[in-house]
Image (tube, rainbow, N blue to C red):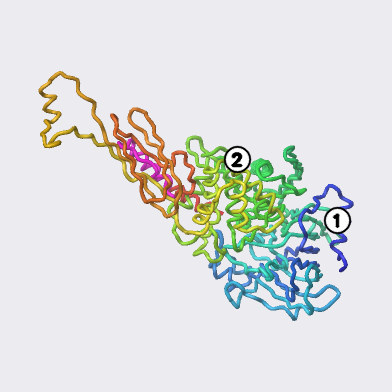
Amino acid sequence: MKKIGPILCVAAMIVSSSPGLFAATGKPIVNYDITARLVPEEKKVEGREVLIWLNDSDVPVSELQFHLYLNAFKNNLSTFMKESGGSHRGFKMDEENWGSITLNKFQIQDGADLLAATSFLQPDDGNPDDQTVLRVGLPAPVKPHESITLAMEFTSKLPKVFARSGFVGDFFMIGQWFPKIGVFQNKAWNCHQYHSTSEFYADFGVYKVAITVPEKYVVGATGKRILERKNADGTRTVTHYQEDVHDFAWAACPDFVEFKETYKLDQPRVETEMILLVHRAHLRQKDRYAGALRNGLEFYSKSYGAYPYPTITLVDPAPGAMAAGGMEYPTLFTAETMSWLPLGVRLPEMVTIHEFGHNYWYGMVGSNEFEEAWLDEGINSYSEIKAMDRYYGAGRSMIDFGSWAIGDETFNRTSVIGSGRFDPIVKKSWDFIGRSSYALNVYSKAALMLLTLERWLGEDVMAGIMRTYFERWKFRHPTTKDFVRVAEEVSGKDLSWFFDQVLYSPDKLDYGISGLSAEEVPEPEGLFDGRKTESAKNVRDKAAGAKTAPKKFRNVVVAARFGEWVFPQEVLIEFDNGEKVRETWDGKDRWKRFVYVKDVKVRSAEVDPGHKLALDVNYANNSRVLEPRKPVVMKIAAGFMEWFQGFLTLISF
């Protein structure tokens, strides 16, 4: 049996001496012990790392692969920079402040030097200028179910804030900053390059990180602070520790104002420390952040499972550092606001709830964001919509100025309306035709897909699916197939017809009313059985004053499938006398005609009257009125939606 190693000994001592700390529930594959020193004037971090990696497979492993994410910002020829064109979320890379990570030492602890055995790989695109994946050959394989301990020294040069990481002035957001081992699964390494449309994937384990900064700096980091000391050189060192996480990030700035409060929930039982690091320029937004975070903790805990960690930290980026906003890390996330933002624009609330929610979908349920990003972004966007509706009102959760209001579901629908048919939801992140296609599919379309499934199965059934999926796969690595299995198991239905369309086809869902008419039924006249029948009009003329028989109308409603996806439909038909008829249609054919001969005319018809099909890309064709009323209103609404889509593009993150 191999020695337990220094970090495991430290972890054991910490847990045994601090019963209030979160006890690991997953199987730790990685154990990181990192010492980091921020050098603000040089915009860099000097680090030392001891990593214990467990080979949890049944095959020997003769090489290791590492992510060196910061090398994406090393030059303009990296894969990230080529794919993004030097722009990310509307922010440009500052070409005077490149970022990089340099390995100064790499060895088996107390053993062989490995630096000379390293080389860069480009497994996704073969770009020889990309240095975000490092391979290291080992002098001897790591045997199955045994571990290896590595010691590294590295320097991380931070870019000016771009794509989630970096600095602006004396504000530092430090993410994806250390040599990070990939995931060994299915007898091979899953270690992708850093792409402009992908995020991250790593194994769960234990992190203990000691961070040294100038004494005036306020620090927030993943996990619980277990140690703090002042140093003789005018710096201070804070040590954070956390189990059952797969990443570690931190932020530092002298202008942070720290707020702490204990959040408690009885059912399910939750007790955690909320830590808000709000920049002085944004202090008037503090209560909005705090309220949204409480709402997020309550919603996700009650909907999916208790939040288990002892801390949750919100980082408010400095003015000019919005490129670091709206990003998630285990037990820590960055928010987004502007000091002038009015209460009626709920951007801070939405970003706070969304990024906190990633502690569930990404943080605890560790899906592969490189290959199946919807399992994180889509499920979390669905959760965000439901949470925003609950706490801020459906139909007004994003924009609320009295009679002028827009909800989060509409916010997401604007991305999907009019979208192309280039990509399906399930696709490797870097294989989408572009960032907009990636975003609308893995965020909005996936969220609307889950809302559609919920409204078809019923809210209680969908709640059972989500709780079961979370409990079964927390601290593990699920795939799309695992989610589908849970959905079918809990619902008791074969859902292949649904998921095969919406996950793997780039087509659209679009049903509507293509025809509506009411024509008077003519009374019999002409030849019948060889005899001429006198027209009813002549008969009435001869019997003037006799009671006229009521007119009859042949009412025709045509429902149509304009898109390629097939979904069962409800059709609501209303007549002039107030009578309502509900019809069902399997939705498979291109159209379905409904005919009614009645004494009254049809007034209107509508497919999906309950708006169950959130995925329907065009609600405008869902209904038709025989005699349209107030056409000007529709023109105004169409113009408003066009303006609103432009507004969303402006503030999108």
Q: Are marks 1 and 2 in contact (CB under 8 Å)?
A: no
Mark nearest the camera among 1 and 2 is 2
Of the two numbered discs 1 and 2 on the same chain, state the one appearing first in sequence.
Answer: 1
- The residue labelled by disc 2 is 460
Front-most of residues 66 and 529? 529
- Asked if the stretch drawn in magenta spans residue 628, the answer is yes
Q: Which quadrant of the figure has residue 430?
A: bottom right
Front-most of residues 525 and 652? 525
Q: Residue at x 74, y 78 (%)?
A: 137
- Provide the residue span drawn in magenta: 617-641
Residue 544 x/y as whole percent:
12, 20
Image quadrant where one finds the C terminus: bottom right
Residue 144 x/y as whole percent:
78, 70
Query: Residue 229's mark?
Result: 1
Q: In this rendering, would 270 be left or right of 99?
A: right
- Asked if the stretch drawn in magenta spans residue 410, the answer is no
Q: Is residue 206 above or below residue 297?
A: below
